Image (cartoon, helix red, strand yellow):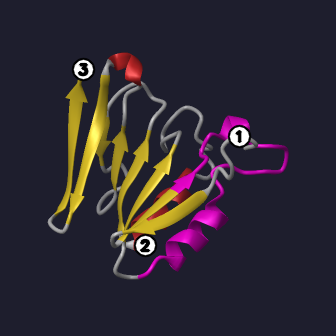
């Protein structure tokens, strides 16, 4: 936090909202709950109706360090919003793209660089395309 700043932040760019939050429950302080679903709910509600939303978090729901008690709330917030296009995560060491909680939200898992690949996400007026690139 001292080096990089707030763990939860968002910004808008070119008609899209990018929401970043800490979802690693192992990092929660006593009495704190991660991810902070109250903050997430406010951020999603504050986004203009025309914006598509991308949510980025370290740990994916259904992941080992995601707080299981918060998982249904997190999934409901994203799904019911109707404008969340992707929930993007790292940490798991595998790549995946699926809809574990149903449409419209796609959950995208990105490998670590140790696997010598990364995802390039193309966003334009026609939609979103994800390419997995190896090096």
Q: Are marks 1 and 2 in contact (CB under 8 Å)?
A: no
* Residue depth check, mark 2 versus mark 3: number of the one nearer the observer: 3
Residues shaded magenta: 20-48
**Which residue is the site of mark 2?**
81
Residue at 36% from the left image edge and 74% from the top image edge: 51
8 w.r.t. 41: above or below = above
Q: Categorize mark 2 by other alpha carbons within 10 Å: few (<14), some (14-19), many (20+).
A: some
Q: Secondary structure at mark 2?
A: helix
Q: Residue lying farthest left?
A: 126
Q: Quadrant of the N terminus?
A: top right
State the count of labels: 3
Q: Horizontal and vertical percent for residue 18? A: 45, 60
**Which residue is the site of mark 3?**
135
Residue at 58% from the left image edge and 40% from the top image edge: 66
| Mark sitting earlier along the chain (2/3) | 2
Relative horizontal placement of residue 3, taking residue 120 as reference (left or right) = right
Q: Residue lying farthest bottom?
A: 49
| Mark sitting earlier along the chain (1/3) | 1
Q: Horizontal and vertical percent for residue 29? A: 81, 43
Residue at 48% from the left image edge and 42% from the top image edge: 60
Q: Horizontal and vertical percent for residue 48? A: 43, 81
């Amino acid at each position: 936090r001292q080096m990089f700043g707030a763990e939860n932040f968002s910004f808008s760019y070119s008609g899209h909202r990018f929401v970043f939050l800490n979802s690693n429950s192992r990092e929660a302080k006593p009495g704190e709950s991660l991810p902070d679903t109250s903050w997430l709910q406010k951020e999603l509600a504050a986004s203009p109706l025309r914006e598509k939303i991308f949510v980025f978090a370290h740990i994916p729901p259904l992941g080992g360090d995601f707080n299981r008690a918060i998982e249904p709330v997190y999934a409901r917030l994203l799904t019911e919003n109707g404008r969340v296009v992707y929930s993007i995560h790292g940490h798991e060491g595998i790549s995946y793209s699926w809809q574990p909680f149903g449409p419209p939200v796609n959950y995208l898992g990105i490998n670590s660089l140790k696997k010598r690949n990364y995802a390039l996400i193309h966003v334009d007026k026609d939609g979103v395309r994800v390419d997995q690139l190896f090096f």
